[in-house]
């Protein structure tokens, strides 16, 4: 099979009506932070148990087409000895892998960050592929402040994302391109829109220069919202209007799907905002979908508490959030459905 045929098949499996992606690829420090409120230690066994619980949730594949895994999960097994990628596959879920190695400060641009991990990436991808990964994810991070992101930061981050995406495609892996503009700060929704427009414009310019085939990519952007510490709150309709306006200005129609991150929104906000986009803007050239981490896992984590006897309750909580986000893909979610 050629790389193009392989990537086309992966895209078709990932991009489906009424479905989105679940991100369960937290790095070791991040998963420890997520486990802390429920008093669970981040041991390898606890991480395995948690991610096995998520991937084996019955009927999850009705709403989830892809799962982004962390490196160690590719090699872990469920209680019956099945590898976790196999568990996902038998649930109708394609598996991908986070391949970046985290962010560091970008020298000479105070406040900006850059993500590491390009060296040896092609070899790592080949190995991940034999372990069941069909797509990859790489996250660049952009803080908003009066002076950030800088022009240099925007250009350097775009270049790295494009190099990552080109390397993925050279081995038949679909790249999820994630330029995350952080929600932290007290900035206005207009300032957020301005930054995301600059960032995405630079990303698509770089993808073009690196000859990345857009048809075999997925964009994972932030929604346009006011900063978390801002006193003004935006309705789902406002978030949808600003977000779709920026996407129209920056994302070519060749991109099949835009799968938002939740980035610190509450579960309900993330669902309501996605729903508004799909109910108000159904004729866009790309699918408007989700690739949530926290907004899909939070309720389930709270239900689980690290206890075997709570596994079913946690899976019920996950399935409910997945179902509601599945409805948001059609623009048919209503707040009353939270009570079902
Ligand atoms: P959140 O939805 O929690 O932002 O996570 C998505 C993700 O994969 C960030 O890289």
Image (spheres, rainbow, N blue to C red):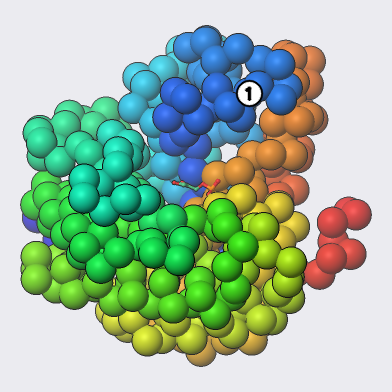
Along the horizontal axis of the image, is 175 left or right of 125? right
Figure quadrant of residue 249: bottom left
Q: Where is residue 309 drawn, in percent x and y?
A: 79, 15
Using the image, determine if residue 80 lies above or below residue 116: above
Residue in the foreground of this view, choosing between 13 and 185:
185
Quadrant of the rendered image containing residue 28: top left
Disc 1 crowd rating (10 Å Cα; few below 14, some 14-19, many 20+) is: some
Q: 46 or 315: nearer the eye? A: 46
Residue 338 appears at what percent x and percent y? 84, 56
Q: Nearer the viewer, residue 27 or 149?
A: 149
User: Dividing the picture into quarters, in which one does residue 27 lie?
Assistant: top left
Residue at the image point whose x is 37% and y is 51% from the top: 111
225 to 162, vertically: above or below: below
Residue at screen point 16% across, 32% down: 124
Cβ of disc 1 within 8 Å of ligand 1?
Answer: no
Asked whether, in this view, residue 71 is left or right of residue 55, the answer is left
**Residue at position x 33%, y 69% from top?**
199
> Would residue 92 be seen by someone viewing this image from the given angle?
no
Asked if residue 79 lies left or right of residue 83, the reply is: right
User: Considering the image in quadrants, where does the C terminus appear?
Assistant: bottom right
Q: Position of residue 101 (x, y in %)?
A: 28, 34
How far from the left and from the top, in percent, is residue 204?
Answer: 24, 73
Relative to 211, is 309 above or below?
A: above
Residue for badge 1: 35
Residue visible at 73% across and 71% down in the picture? 232
Numbered-mark total: 1
The local secondary structure at tag 1 comes to helix
Q: Is residue 101 visible?
A: yes
Q: Seen in the image, is 239 located left or right of residue 12? A: right
């Amino acid at each position: 099979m050629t790389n193009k045929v392989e990537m086309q098949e992966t895209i078709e499996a990932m991009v489906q009506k009424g479905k989105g992606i679940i991100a369960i690829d937290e790095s070791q420090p991040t998963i420890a932070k997520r486990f802390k409120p429920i008093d669970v230690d981040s041991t390898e066994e606890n991480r395995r148990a948690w991610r096995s619980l998520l991937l084996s949730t019955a009927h999850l594949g009705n709403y989830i087409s892809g799962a982004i895994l962390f490196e160690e999960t590719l090699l872990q097994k469920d209680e019956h000895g099945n590898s976790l990628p196999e568990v996902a596959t038998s649930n109708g879920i394609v598996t991908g892998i986070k391949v970046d190695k985290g962010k560091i400060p970008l020298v000479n641009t105070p406040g900006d960050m850059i993500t590491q991990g390009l060296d040896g990436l092609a070899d790592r991808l080949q190995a991940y592929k034999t372990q069941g990964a069909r797509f990859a994810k790489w996250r660049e991070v952009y803080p908003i402040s009066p002076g950030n992101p800088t022009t240099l930061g925007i250009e350097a981050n775009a270049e790295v994302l494009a190099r990552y995406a080109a390397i993925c495609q050279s081995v038949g892996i679909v790249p999820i391109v994630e330029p995350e503009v952080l929600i932290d700060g007290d900035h206005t929704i207009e300032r957020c829109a301005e930054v995301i427009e600059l960032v995405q414009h630079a990303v698509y310019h770089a993808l073009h220069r690196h000859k990345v085939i857009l048809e075999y990519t997925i964009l994972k952007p932030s929604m346009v919202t006011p900063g978390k510490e801002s006193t003004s709150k935006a309705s789902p309709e406002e978030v949808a209007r600003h977000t779709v306006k920026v996407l129209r200005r920056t994302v070519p129609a060749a991109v099949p799907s835009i799968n938002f991150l939740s980035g610190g929104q509450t579960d309900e906000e993330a669902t309501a905002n996605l729903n508004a986009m799909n109910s108000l803007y159904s004729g866009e050239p790309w699918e408007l979908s989700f690739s949530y981490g926290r907004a899909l896992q939070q309720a389930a984590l709270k239900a689980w508490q690290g206890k075997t006897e709570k596994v079913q309750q946690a899976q019920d909580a996950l399935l409910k959030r997945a179902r509601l986000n599945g409805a948001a893909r059609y623009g048919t979610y209503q707040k009353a459905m939270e009570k079902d």
